[in-house]
């Protein structure tokens, strides 16, 4: 008979930079924490060297953070699972953990983005694969992995339809340097996390073309309006987009060069394609994948998102950045509230 999972234990699934940073934070606060990743050799190196050399070399792994190479064991031994993989890998991993979940298991994720093939948000994918009864939650907000792992002050949002799960997860990750707020608007939190990456590419392109601070702030402000329109159309609350997972995350990723998506935009402005930019950065740039999904979802929903549309055209239709900017600026004048 397998041992029942400890009630307060957490396993982080995904040993990239963000998963590692969250595992470090959870181990500091929560104690009983494990980290699983898909690369056995990298995990072995992390277990012996106590550092994630590829994704987060600046952070020392706490002694109480266990490195677990067996996905099934990681799931069965921990009541709460925190999925931290790129959005395009989310379905595959959730499907893999499903057979190992127990009746008291709880699944959260920090993955951001619409599913490419279906346009579904992560909570929709999770419900499809895990059924209607399991407690689910999402973590999102203005966070860079390196700063979280370094213990610099940070705040984010934990959203769940189950308030008890949201409160408990917020408590287990929070300390004097890390504060988690709770929300019941999973749709709004997820839409903010998906759309902001597309807009960050746009902000990088704008800055890379030398358009200045005025243009950057116009893009952020009008991008926030686009994000909110889409979210409300999908069932979110408008006020969610004024919070950490909306405006907070958007401003962060559009203005700081720790953002991979902003850096991708800078490279695209310098003449690289989206593929070349991602290759040069060396890590997943979620906004490149999200641009297509956001555009498709917006069109199906009848939502006007001109900035995201132009980012899509640059990435997938070969439109020159200058031409895309001209298309945006030549749109018919209208009241600000009209979009």
Image: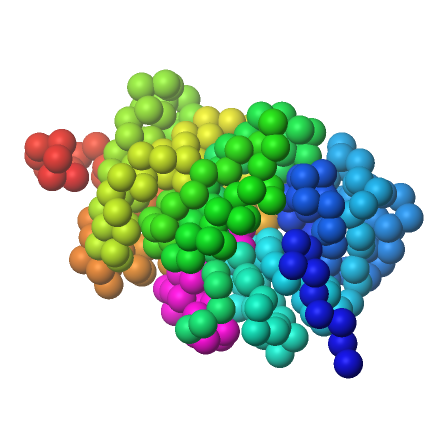
**Magenta region, residue range:** 109-131
Camera-nearest residue between 295 and 332: 295
Residue at point 37% right, 18% down?
213
User: Is residue 172 placed above or below 103 in the rendered structure?
Assistant: above
Residue at left offset 39%, top offset 57%:
161
Could you tell me residue 222's position as x and y percent?
Answer: 26, 34
Residue at the image position 71 percent from the left and 70 percent from the top? 4
Image coordinates for residue 41, horizontal then vertical, percent = 85, 58
Return the residue found at the far bottom: 1
Q: Nearer the viewer, residue 8 or 199?
A: 8
Say which residue appears at 39% left-offset and 46% top-offset: 183
Q: Is residue 303 left or right of residue 242?
A: left
**Coloring applied to the structure:** rainbow
Reply above or below: 25 against 188: above
Point out residue 290 in the picture as x, y percentages from the top left corner: 43, 53
Numbered-mark total: 0
Q: Position of residue 131 (x, y in %)?
A: 45, 75
Whether residue 40 can be seen here:
yes
Does the magenta segment cover residue 263? no
Horizontal relation, residue 4 to residue 269: left or right: right
Does the magenta run of residues contain 114?
A: yes
Determine if residue 198 is in view.
Answer: no
Using residue 160 as the reference point, say whether residue 47 is left or right of it.
Answer: right
Q: Pick the quarter of the image with the N terminus.
A: bottom right
């Amino acid at each position: 008979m397998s041992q029942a999972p400890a009630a307060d234990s957490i396993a982080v699934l995904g040993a990239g930079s963000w998963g590692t940073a969250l595992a470090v934070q959870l181990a500091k606060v929560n104690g009983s924490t494990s980290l699983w990743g898909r690369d056995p050799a990298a995990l072995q190196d992390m277990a012996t060297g106590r550092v994630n050399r590829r994704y987060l070399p600046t952070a020392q792994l706490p002694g109480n953070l266990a490195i677990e190479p067996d996905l099934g064991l990681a799931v069965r031994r921990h009541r709460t699972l925190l999925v931290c993989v790129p959005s395009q890998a989310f379905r595959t991993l959730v499907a893999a953990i499903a057979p190992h979940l127990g009746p008291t298991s709880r699944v959260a994720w920090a993955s951001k983005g619409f599913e490419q093939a279906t346009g579904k948000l992560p909570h929709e994918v999770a419900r499809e694969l895990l059924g209607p009864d399991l407690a689910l939650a999402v973590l999102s907000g203005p966070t860079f992995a390196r700063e979280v792992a370094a213990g610099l002050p940070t705040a984010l949002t934990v959203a769940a339809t189950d308030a008890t799960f949201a409160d408990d997860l917020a408590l287990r990750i929070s300390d004097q340097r890390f504060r988690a707020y709770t929300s019941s608007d999973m749709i709004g939190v997820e839409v903010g996390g998906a759309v902001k990456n597309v807009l960050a590419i746009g902000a990088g392109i704008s800055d890379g073309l030398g358009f200045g601070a005025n243009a950057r702030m116009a893009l952020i402000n009008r991008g926030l309006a686009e994000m909110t329109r889409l979210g409300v159309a999908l069932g979110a609350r408008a006020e969610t987009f004024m919070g950490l997972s909306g405006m907070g995350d958007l401003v962060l990723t559009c203005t700081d060069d720790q953002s991979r998506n902003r850096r991708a935009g800078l490279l695209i402005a310098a003449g690289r394609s989206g593929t070349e930019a991602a290759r040069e950065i060396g890590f997943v740039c979620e906004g490149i994948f999200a641009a297509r999904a956001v555009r498709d979802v917006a069109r199906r929903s009848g939502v006007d998102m001109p900035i995201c549309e132009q980012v899509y055209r640059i990435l997938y239709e070969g439109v020159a950045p200058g031409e895309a900017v001209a298309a945006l600026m030549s749109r018919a004048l209208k009241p600000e509230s009209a979009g």
